[in-house]
Image (spheres, rainbow, N blue to C red):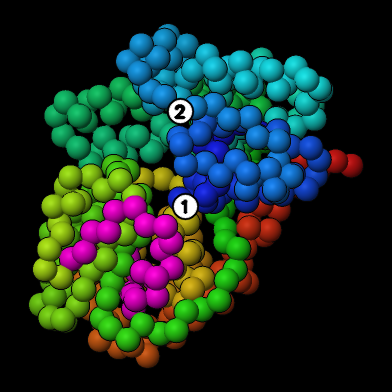
C-alpha cells in the first residue's frame, strides 16, 4: 500500500480513510505500507496493527519539486516526488511477489506504474483534476489561471494512468461521473466512520467548524462563514459563539479570531470542541470527495448545517442529521434556528448518529473494495 503520509494519528479525513483501508487489508495478508513521515507519524502504533511500515522523511525543496515536475508533469504530484520514495516502494516490491498493490491518491501513481502485481487498485480520495478546477472557479486572475493549468495537467495524468489499474475507487457517484474514460472497473466506496457514543447535549449556543484550516476550500469556507454568515447568526442569537477548529489555519482564518469567534489552531482531540457545540457547520463552496468531518459530528450526535458542496456524496443524510442551504442568509437561518431550538438540534443529532451506524460504517463503505481484492 502506497499513500502520501503515514495515516496515524488519524487526525484528518485522508488519514482516517487510509487507516481504515490499511487496517482491513492487514487482516487479509501481510501488509507493507509505504508513506511519508512529516515528523508526527505514529509508526509504532501502525506496527501494533500488524503493518510493516516503510517511512520516508517528508521534505519539500525547490530542486526536488523541479525534478518532480520532470517526472510527473504536475506541480501537485511533483511535491510528493522523491528518489527516496522510489527506492522505498521499489525495494518493498522486490522483496516478494505482490498480490495486491493499493495506491492512495493520484499523486502517488508515478511511483508504481510499472510494478508487477496480481491485482492493482487506485483509491482516489478526490478526482484531483476536478478538485483543482473547483479551486480555480473560486479564484480570479493569475491564481485562477495557474489552477486551471494544474487541473489540466492532472487530467492528462488521470487519462494516462487510470486504465493501468484493475480497479479505480471513488467516494461517490458524483466523483465517478468526474472520472475520465478508460477505467477497467470503478468501485464506489464512500467515506465512513467507526461508530462511537453520542455526547451529552451542549448547554450553550456554540457552533463549530472543524477542518484542516490550511486547505484552500476550508480557508474559503471559514472566511465566508466568519465574514458573511456569522454576523447574521449573531443578529438572531446575540450570545452565540463560533469555534473554528483545525490545524494550520491560514492568515485569513486567524484574522477572524476575536469577540465571539475562537480560532484554535491544531488540537490533539476535536471531541471537547464537538462536546461544547450545539451545531456543526460545513459551509464549503469548492472541493470534492466527501466530508468525513460531517460523519464525525453526526456520529457523536451533533446536527450539521452544510452547503450542497459540503455534503456532496452524502445526500442520504439530508434530513437525517444534515440541513442544507447554499446562501449566506439560508445558512445563517438554519444555524440560528437550531441554536434557538435545543430540542430540535438534539433530535436531529441523534438521527444523524443513527444514520451513520445504520448506513455509513467503514465496513459498509469499503465492502465493494474488500470483495474485489479478497483472496479466493
Q: In the image as oriented, which residue stretches furthest toward the right? A: 376
Crowding around mark 2 (Cα neighbors within 10 Å: few <14, some 14 to 19, many 20+) is: some
Residue at x 23%, y 41% (from the top left corner):
138
Closer to us: 184 or 60: 60
Which quadrant does the N terminus fall into?
top right
For label 2, the residue is 58
Question: Is 355 left, or right, of 201 in this rendering?
Answer: right
Magenta highlight on residue 278: yes
Q: Secondary structure at mark 2?
A: loop
Residue at x 30%, y 46% (from the top left corner):
248
**Residue 194 showing in the rendered view:** yes
Which quadrant does the C terminus fall into?
top right
Residue at x 51%, y 78% (from the top left corner):
198
Magenta highlight on residue 295: no
Per the rendered image, the range of residues in magenta is 261-285
Q: Point out which mark residue 11 bears.
A: 1
Q: Secondary structure at mark 1?
A: loop
Q: Label 1 vs label 2: CA separation?
A: 17 Å
Amino acid at each position: 500500500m502506497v499513500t502520501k503520509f503515514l495515516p496515524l494519528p488519524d487526525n484528518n479525513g485522508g488519514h482516517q480513510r487510509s487507516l481504515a483501508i490499511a487496517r482491513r487489508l492487514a487482516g487479509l495478508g501481510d501488509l507493507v505500507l509505504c508513506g511519508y513521515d512529516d515528523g508526527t507519524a505514529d509508526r509504532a502504533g501502525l506496527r501494533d496493527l500488524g503493518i510493516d511500515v516503510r517511512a520516508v522523511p517528508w521534505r519539500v525543496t525547490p530542486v526536488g519539486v523541479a525534478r518532480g515536475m520532470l517526472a510527473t508533469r504536475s506541480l501537485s504530484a511533483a511535491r510528493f516526488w522523491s528518489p527516496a520514495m522510489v527506492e522505498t516502494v521499489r525495494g518493498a516490491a522486490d522483496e516478494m511477489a505482490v498480490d495486491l498493490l493499493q495506491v492512495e491518491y493520484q499523486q502517488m501513481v508515478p511511483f508504481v506504474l510499472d510494478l508487477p502485481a496480481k491485482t492493482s487498485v487506485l483509491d482516489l480520495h478526490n478526482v484531483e483534476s476536478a478538485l483543482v478546477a473547483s479551486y480555480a472557479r473560486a479564484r480570479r486572475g493569475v491564481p485562477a489561471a495557474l489552477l486551471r493549468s494544474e487541473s489540466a495537467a492532472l487530467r492528462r495524468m488521470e487519462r494516462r494512468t487510470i486504465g493501468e489499474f484493475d480497479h479505480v475507487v471513488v467516494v461517490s457517484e458524483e466523483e465517478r461521473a468526474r472520472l475520465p474514460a478508460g477505467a477497467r472497473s470503478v468501485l464506489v466506496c464512500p467515506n465512513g466512520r467507526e461508530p462511537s457514543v453520542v455526547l451529552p447535549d451542549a448547554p450553550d449556543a456554540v457552533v463549530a467548524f472543524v477542518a484542516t484550516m490550511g486547505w484552500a476550500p476550508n480557508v474559503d469556507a471559514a472566511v465566508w462563514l466568519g465574514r458573511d454568515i456569522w454576523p447574521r447568526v449573531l443578529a438572531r442569537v446575540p450570545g452565540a459563539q463560533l469555534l473554528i477548529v483545525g490545524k494550520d489555519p491560514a492568515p485569513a482564518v486567524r484574522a477572524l479570531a476575536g469577540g465571539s469567534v475562537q480560532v484554535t489552531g491544531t488540537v490533539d482531540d476535536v471531541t471537547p470542541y464537538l462536546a461544547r457545540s450545539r451545531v456543526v457547520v460545513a459551509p464549503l463552496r469548492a472541493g470534492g470527495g466527501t466530508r468525513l468531518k460531517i460523519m464525525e459530528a453526526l456520529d457523536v450526535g451533533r446536527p450539521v448545517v452544510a452547503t450542497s458542496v459540503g455534503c456532496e456524496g452524502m445526500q442520504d443524510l439530508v434530513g437525517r442529521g444534515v440541513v442544507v442551504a447554499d446562501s449566506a442568509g439560508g445558512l445563517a437561518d438554519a444555524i440560528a434556528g437550531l441554536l434557538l431550538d435545543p430540542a430540535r438540534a438534539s433530535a436531529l443529532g441523534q438521527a444523524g448518529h443513527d444514520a451513520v451506524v445504520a448506513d455509513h460504517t467503514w465496513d459498509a463503505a469499503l465492502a465493494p473494495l474488500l470483495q474485489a481484492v479478497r483472496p479466493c
